[in-house]
């Protein structure tokens, strides 16, 4: 304000404003009497000042009235009453965004946890709200960053639209169905989110709405980069800075919605809070503290979001919450096998379940990802389309879903922790090895085939594979808030984990008769004897490996057999 007045030849008044702490927020309320109270007596200067300051009144008034008229308030069960920007309302009120109401946030977990009925719709709105809270907090506390209102709006929209590309049952679709149906491609839902965003804007004529809020094509590119990273359809500008939406001086904005550097972003904060709320699991991470403690600092010539040193324990709590959610819910043994069964049903139905795309073309479900017109019609409802369809060609798929409805699931016969991690591509070979490991004394009767055995290789980690995620985060101290520093794990607590990843292996049997299940258990146990793994756990029981020496007729010790003894354990479902 003082600099502006100085440029207008009113440096004396600018100095008086400084001494009286007059900020931009006060400008619309200043009048002739106010200036005289500050000791400004020169009538000419008072008149000129009032005229100049009057220029601020009109835009302030019009913006205030616009916001007051168009903002809507949503009552969110997690974040409370939240204001939603009018442009976000335009986006929400489209078929492409409303589609998210029919996609479960946790996929197959709803079949195990009755409270997990929330959808991608409310998660997207929550992520948008938290994105706005974080960027506005940085804007207010660090005005030197020059975060403009259009920057704030772009970040909010990216949070809102980051999950537009999810398919039926969320990660089951891009993690299991597409890799099995189209193994030749490497497709991720983030790519579909960008394509769906383009389709949403074009088909609903929203470009004019974006222009109203001073958002141009570069801003649209920025939004898409916030969702999915550097665009693959454009060459990288430089190896050091591959983005087109914003210059390198705004690098920290790319860490808000999807943080590729540390994994600490508002997407996680919302699904931690929302999933814990609906699953009945305690969330020990406080995102509100992080927002208040976040600060942008120059680290190796790149502006990064850093956090106060005393927040290190809170950050570890965040990653521990992630680990607990994966262990107790996301990778629950029952929800996992239900998702496997749904995937099998979708694969069998894929050639016959068609969706109309652009120009009326009929596409398979696996092909719909290439056509947003068709893909916008693919939701969790495909489950009930198959289940209630009378087409005889869907009979095999329908039978699998009927097994789920009757809770006649493939049986989990055991699990173990692998000391030497295996690649997911090895799962089929492991199934064959287990099927071939049936003990000779159980070889009679129905044979155990490789297709009868399902192997799940599940990695539990803190979000950065086997690395400590805090190693990529920088901290600052109260005494030196502009200097970024590393924080070693032992400076936080000696009770923190030494290892940040482990791989579990679960084995299921498609056959449900008692004879086949016992054979499968024995085969799995026999297979573990030659592997680097922990003692196998069978369902709700832990097998104690008790070597039993056999004795020949002449008293010599023969081969070693293994006796399985089971200790019952409590298991929560």
Image (spheres, helix red, strand yellow):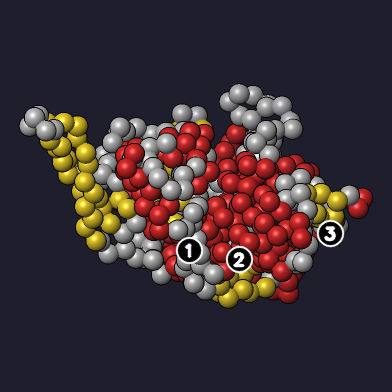
**Position of residue 32 measured from the top left corner of the image (x, y, whole percent):** 66, 70
Tags 2 and 3 touching, CB below 8 Å: no
* Residue at 76%, 45% in the rendered image: 367
Query: Which quarter of the rendering shows the N terminus?
Result: bottom right
Label 2 packing within 10 angstroms: few (<14), some (14-19), many (20+) = few
* Residue at 67%, 35% in the rendered image: 185
Residue hosting label 3: 204
Q: Which numbered disc flags the more N-terminal residue, 1 or 2?
A: 1
Label 1 packing within 10 angstroms: few (<14), some (14-19), many (20+) = many
* Residue at 66%, 57% in the rendered image: 397
Q: Return the residue found at the far right.
A: 359
**Vertical side of 453 occupied by 401: above or below:** below
Tell me which corner region of the image, top left, top right, bottom left or bottom right, holds residue 481: top left
Query: Which quarter of the rendering shows the C terminus?
Result: bottom left
| 423 relative position to 363: left or right | left
Look at the numbered disc 2 and give the secondary structure of its residue.
helix
How much space separates mark 1 and mark 3, taking CA atoms? 31 Å
Q: Return the residue found at the far front.
A: 553
Tags 1 and 3 touching, CB below 8 Å: no
**Vertical side of 374 occupied by 178: above or below:** above
**Position of residue 93 measured from the top left corner of the image (x, y, whole percent):** 75, 67
Numbered badge on residue 402? 2
How much space separates mark 1 and mark 2, taking CA atoms? 28 Å
Q: Which numbered disc flags the more N-terminal residue, 1 or 3?
A: 3
Residue hosting label 1: 275
**Vertical side of 515 occupied by 219: above or below:** above
Q: Nearer the viewer, mark 1 or mark 3?
A: 1
Numbered badge on residue 226? none
Q: Nearer the viewer, mark 2 or mark 3?
A: 2
Q: Nearer the viewer, residue 65 or 310?
A: 310
């Amino acid at each position: 304000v003082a600099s502006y007045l100085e440029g207008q030849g009113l440096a004396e008044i600018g100095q008086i404003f400084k001494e009286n702490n007059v900020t931009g927020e006060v400008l619309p309320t200043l009048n002739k009497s106010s200036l005289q109270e500050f000791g400004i007596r020169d009538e000419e200067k008072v008149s000129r000042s009032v005229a100049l300051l009057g220029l601020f009144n009109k835009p302030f008034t019009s913006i205030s009235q616009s916001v007051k008229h168009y903002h809507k308030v949503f009552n969110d069960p997690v974040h409370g009453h939240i204001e939603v920007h009018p442009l976000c309302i335009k986006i929400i009120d489209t078929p492409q965004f409303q589609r998210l109401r029919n996609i479960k946030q946790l996929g197959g977990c709803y079949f195990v946890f009755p409270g997990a009925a929330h959808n991608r719709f409310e998660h997207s709105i929550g992520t948008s709200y938290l994105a706005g809270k974080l960027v506005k907090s940085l804007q207010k506390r660090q005005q030197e960053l020059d975060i403009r209102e259009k920057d704030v709006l772009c970040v909010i929209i990216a949070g809102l639209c980051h999950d537009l590309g999810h398919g039926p049952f969320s990660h089951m679709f891009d993690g299991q169905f597409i890799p099995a149906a189209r193994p030749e491609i490497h497709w991720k839902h983030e790519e579909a989110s960008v394509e769906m965003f383009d389709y949403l804007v074009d088909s609903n004529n929203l470009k004019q709405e974006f222009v109203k809020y001073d958002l141009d094509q570069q801003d649209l590119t920025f939004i898409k980069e916030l969702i999915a990273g550097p665009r693959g359809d454009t060459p990288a500008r430089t190896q050091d800075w591959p983005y087109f939406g914003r210059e390198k001086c705004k690098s920290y904005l790319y860490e808000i919605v999807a943080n590729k550097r540390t994994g600490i972003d508002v997407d996680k904060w919302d699904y931690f809070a929302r999933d814990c709320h609906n699953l009945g699991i305690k969330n020990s991470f406080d995102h509100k503290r992080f927002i208040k403690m976040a600060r942008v600092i120059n680290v190796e010539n790149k502006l990064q979001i850093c956090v106060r040193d005393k927040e290190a324990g809170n950050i570890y709590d965040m990653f521990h919450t992630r680990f607990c959610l994966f262990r107790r819910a996301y990778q629950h043994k029952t929800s996992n096998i239900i998702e496997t069964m749904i995937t099998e049903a979708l694969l069998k139905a894929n050639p016959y379940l068609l969706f109309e795309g652009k120009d009326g073309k009929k596409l398979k479900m696996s092909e719909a990802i290439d056509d947003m017109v068709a893909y916008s019609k693919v939701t969790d409802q495909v489950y009930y389309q198959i289940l209630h369809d009378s087409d005889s060609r869907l009979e095999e798929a329908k039978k699998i879903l009927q097994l789920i409805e009757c809770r006649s699931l493939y049986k989990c016969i055991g699990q173990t922790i692998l000391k030497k991690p295996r690649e997911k591509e090895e799962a089929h070979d492991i199934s064959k090895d287990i099927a071939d490991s049936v003990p000779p004394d159980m070889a009679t009767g129905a044979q155990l085939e490789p297709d009868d055995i399902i192997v799940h290789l599940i990695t539990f980690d803190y979000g950065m594979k086997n690395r400590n995620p805090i190693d990529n985060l920088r901290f600052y101290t109260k005494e030196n808030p502009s200097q970024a520093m590393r924080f070693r794990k032992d400076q936080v607590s000696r009770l923190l984990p030494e290892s940040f990843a482990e791989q579990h292996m679960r084995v299921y049997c498609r056959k449900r008769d008692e004879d086949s299940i016992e054979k499968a258990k024995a085969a799995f146990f026999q297979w573990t004897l030659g592997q680097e793994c922990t003692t196998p756990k069978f369902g709700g029981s832990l097998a104690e490996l008790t070597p039993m020496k056999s004795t020949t007729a002449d008293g010599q010790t023969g081969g070693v057999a293994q006796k399985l003894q089971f200790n019952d354990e409590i298991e929560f479902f």
